[in-house]
Amino acid sequence: MSPDKSPTIKIQLDNNLSLIKFKASQEEFESLKADGITIINIIGTCNLNEWGGNISPQILIEDYEIINKTNYIF
């Protein structure tokens, strides 16, 4: 992936709140991908996202820690 195409990490919660980190590294992106459940602690800044005339709450991720990761086994 080229340096100007850094992945964006976005976690959408059921209550219309999104957690987002722009310009994440490919390693960060891969570490959060899961075929199961990933439990993380997040430090972030509250923000409002305005897009297409809609306003929704979001948290800009500043730092995070992976606490536990469980893959589904079928």
Image (cartoon, rainbow, N blue to C red):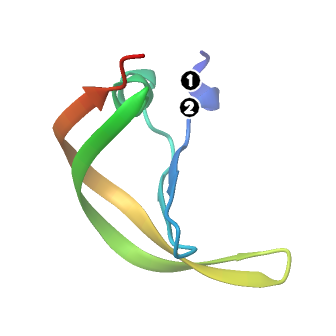
33 lies above or below 50: above
Q: Pick whichever, 47 or 13, lies toward us.
A: 13
Percent position (x, y) of residue 18? Answer: 52, 65
Q: Which amino acid, by three-letter code, is at mark 2? A: Ser
Residue 41 found in image quarter: bottom left
**CA–CA distance in space, label 1 to label 2:** 6 Å
Q: Is label 2 in a helix, a strand or a loop?
A: loop
Q: Which amino acid, by three-letter code, is at mark 1? A: Pro
Percent position (x, y) of residue 51? Answer: 77, 73
Considering every residue shown, the one lying at the far front of the view is 74
Left or right: 58 as drawn, with respect to 2: left
Percent position (x, y) of residue 31? Answer: 34, 26
Q: Residue at left 31%, top 57%?
A: 62
Residue 42 found in image quarter: bottom left
Q: Residue at left 30%, top 39%?
A: 38
Q: Name the residue under label 2.
A: 6
Q: Residue at left 36%, top 18%?
A: 73
Q: Pick whichever, 36 or 73, lies toward us.
A: 73
Left or right: 31 as drawn, with respect to 66: right
Q: Quadrant of the N terminus?
A: top right
Q: Mark 1 points at which residue?
A: 3
Q: Residue at left 62%, top 29%?
A: 4
Considering every residue shown, the one lying at the far right of the view is 52
Mark 1 vs mark 2, foreground winner is 2
Q: Is label 1 in a helix, a strand or a loop?
A: helix
Asked if marks 1 and 2 touch (Cβ < 8 Å), the reply is yes
